[in-house]
Image (cartoon, grey):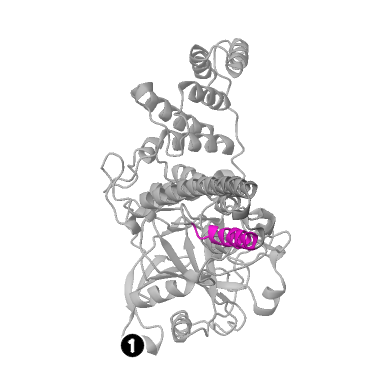
Amino acid sequence: MIPSKLFPLLLFLLSQSLQGNSSSDIFSSITAIDQAVSAGRHLASELQTYVTKEEARLAKMRLLIGRLENATRNCANNTHDEDGLFDASAQETIANPVSAFLTIFRLASNWSKELAVLLDVPISDSGQEETSVTAFNEFNSRRKLFLRLRWYADMLPGASDVDGALDAIIRLQQTYEIPASDIAEGRILPTSQSPRLTERQCMHLGLFAYELGDYPRAVEWFQLVLDRLNRVPLHQRNADDDGANPISHAMVYDHLSYALGRAGRYREALDVTNLLLNEDPNSRNGALNKMFYEMELKRYKGNDPPPIQQDTSMEAGWETGDFDDLCRKADKPMHPDYRLSCRYTVPHPFFLIGPIKEEVMQVDPPIVLWHEFVTKNEAEMIIDLAKPKLKRALVRNPSSGVLEPAPYRVTKNVWLPDDLNNLTKSINSRIRMVTGLSIDHGEELQVANYGLGGYYAPHFDYARRFEVDAYERNHGNRIATFMVYLTPVQLGGATVFTKIGAIVKPVARSAVFWYNLLRSGDGDLRSRHGACPVLVGSKWVMNKWIRDSGQELKRPCLLEQEPFDPLDEYNDI
């Protein structure tokens, strides 16, 4: 079958030959007949050249198709790993952190650039024209084909997503103290297996941990790769899926030596360096490291250098430790607190027929959980409304006031207007009735979905004195937070309060409520909280931030001012 792109060329050549025949009278001259034979050979040669180039292009395209099919097959139908141990549905697969990590790794590439080169479309022009997948009924040019393919390609992960996935796995490992071997061998879930990581993927995690300055975990990942290499003979090792050569002992020894050295373990680093030089006597890194470690060990009389004392007074020290500790406790059995209680309550006549199931999570400051605040159908409808419009969540920079992405908030969200439809109107009405607060100045409903290892580091919901802007001056500060857990979360994802040690585990369709301000209107530092990394599952939440304008009679001041020092807002972070 002749490729469709050849038809214009063949028609042109045929028309030219017909025109030539009508005026040349080839039959009347032997020379003309000889020229015709020569022209036929050249025509065949030109067509063969064209076909060869198109076949080469098609061969590259088939390789690209194979990469995509292999990646999506492993992700969408990831019902078992190479050992046949893992069995899960597609939805469960993506909810598993290792599977989600592998999905991003396998699908990550600069697809738009590859397509532009493959189809010979100028890359400089590739972003100037927006299009939709439904824009073309047929491909009458490479340009239009590229635009349609790019519509899909732009939805696929890129290099930044790979970095984000690596960061997420290391964050989960740090927060929940998960051994690297459990992650690599698919033992995160207590009830089922997950896919295994390859040696190269483990190396990527070790290198990323090293770049983060987490040298102990870098050592752990490099040592894991080394243990695997020692169990598999060289001739039995396979190349990676992308065709890369197998990981070598020398490569691992090189990185492990550096990581051990940066961790202050000079004696072990020297031993590994000697192993590196046995593998590769010409290693320049090995020779330099050996000289350095021998010199340093001589200086410290054969001992490792004294550990460097870190300043734990900074937020990155003590608060991160408290945050991680609370996140680890969230999924463990906790001792009962007899000050807490559960009850049916009727905060408004609307709930007379169906009282609210209220669980007190913290007495002072009050934190309550209202169970089954939304129905399963309502939660699904809210998620369906939010999915097409999700964008990376932004955080207000306290110095500039500009909204910008932040590494300590890994989630996507969307704002739903209060009057969007009957559902949003109904939910807002119920929030007003159950809290007893005015929502006239409240913010729109915000729906958020947390991704791989998605979390939000400890923060205040209210604006501190040096953060107040025009919006706060017009509508008041955030007096309270109302948050609905729309979906169940299998592991992780708790909301923890680092100042008071309170933990609220996500309960599907329940709503948690707390005050951010004291009755005086000053910020309540005890409301500092964070969202723990999601370990297993897909976490969807819906927030409603209520402003203090109009609450003067709803939550009046006390006769005596509550203890508050304005300087605390500047000193306490």
Q: Quadrant of residue 460?
A: bottom right
Q: Nearer the viewer, residue 449 or 333?
A: 449
Residue on which disc 1 sits: 352
Q: Is residue 83 left or right of residue 165?
A: left
Numbered marks: total: 1
Q: Position of residue 434 (x, y in %)?
A: 43, 81
Main secondary-structure element of the magenta-colored stretch: helix
Q: Residue at x 62, y 38 (%)?
A: 311
Q: Is residue 389 above or below residue 166?
A: below
Q: Is residue 306 above or below residue 118?
A: above
Q: Is residue 285 visible?
A: yes
Magenta residues span 3-22
* Label 1 residue SS: loop
Q: Nearer the viewer, residue 404 or 480?
A: 404
Q: Position of residue 565 (x, y in %)?
A: 66, 61
Q: Position of residue 426 (x, y in %)?
A: 44, 85
Q: Is residue 234 magenta?
A: no
Q: Is residue 138 left or right of residue 375?
A: right
Q: Is residue 460 visible?
A: no
For the N terminus, the image quarter is: bottom left
Q: Nearer the viewer, residue 439 or 121?
A: 121
Q: Residue at x 32, y 47 (%)?
A: 189
Q: Is residue 17 magenta?
A: yes
Q: Looking at numbered disc 1 in the image, what kind of residue is underneath it?
A: Leu
